[in-house]
């Protein structure tokens, strides 16, 4: 397990990370959207393993219908997503954990102290959280997609 000193944050050290976990609340909206975007841009054929989980997951549920629709419109199939709860095994197994909110980051670091230093907000480079579009209609999901796509691009630049 690699702990990032503050002095290395933002450096080329991110290129070492190949196992990436995205985390949101229920693991049906934001984290699956980010997971599938990352999978498109960081393919398994290049050694990347990308997954998602929730801090209060609706375990076994599929992605929200709007997530599936939005991703489909961008040529990404998320119909096979199944919500998963983050646990000690996932927090240990993944080298980089990307929560969508600062509150999630703090929760993960408190619940899994060994993850400290490997947990970096997905909106880190824009200094932003990703608003939850759940039950807010299709336009909210489109806006979430756009913001997550930009945040994912920021990470891809550092991970490749």
Image (spheres, rainbow, N blue to C red):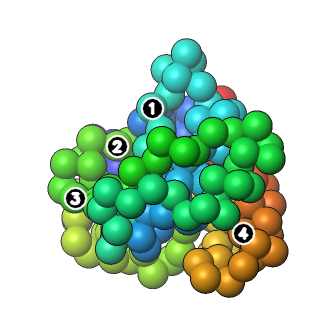
* Mark 1 crowdedness (10 Å alpha carbons): few <14, some 14-19, many ≥20: some
Q: Can the viewer see residue 35 in this picture?
A: yes
The residue singled out by tag 4 in the image is 141
Of the two numbered discs 2 and 3 on the same chain, state the one appearing first in sequence. 3
Disc 1 versus disc 4: distance between alpha carbons? 25 Å
The residue singled out by tag 1 in the image is 49
Task: Please name the residue shown 68% across and 34% down the image.
Answer: 41
Residue 1 horizontal side relative to residue 34, left or right = left
Q: Position of residue 17 (x, y in %)?
A: 47, 35
Q: Position of residue 96 (x, y in %)?
A: 43, 47
Of the two numbered discs 1 and 2 on the same chain, state the one appearing first in sequence. 1
Of the two numbered discs 1 and 4 on the same chain, state the one appearing first in sequence. 1
Residue 128 horizontal side relative to residue 62, left or right = right
Task: Please name the residue shown 65% across and 77% down the image.
Answer: 133
Residue 145 horizontal side relative to residue 115, left or right = right
Q: Secondary structure at mark 1?
A: strand
Task: Please name the residue shown 18% across and 56% down the image.
Answer: 88
Q: Secondary structure at mark 3?
A: loop
């Amino acid at each position: 397990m690699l702990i990032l000193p503050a002095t290395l944050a933002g450096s080329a050290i991110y290129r070492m990370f190949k196992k990436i976990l995205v985390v949101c609340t229920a693991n049906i909206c934001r984290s699956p959207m980010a997971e599938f975007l990352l999978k498109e841009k960081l393919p398994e054929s290049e050694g990347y393993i990308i997954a998602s989980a929730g801090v209060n997951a609706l375990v076994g549920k599929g992605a929200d219908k709007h997530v599936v629709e939005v991703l489909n419109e961008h040529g990404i199939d998320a119909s096979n997503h199944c919500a998963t709860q983050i646990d000690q095994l996932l927090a240990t197994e993944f080298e980089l954990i990307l929560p969508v909110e600062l509150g999630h980051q703090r929760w993960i670091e408190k619940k899994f102290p060994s993850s400290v230093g490997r947990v970096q907000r997905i909106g880190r480079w824009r200094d932003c959280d990703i608003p939850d579009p759940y039950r807010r209609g299709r336009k909210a999901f489109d806006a979430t997609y756009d913001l997550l796509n930009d945040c994912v691009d920021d990470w891809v630049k550092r991970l490749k």
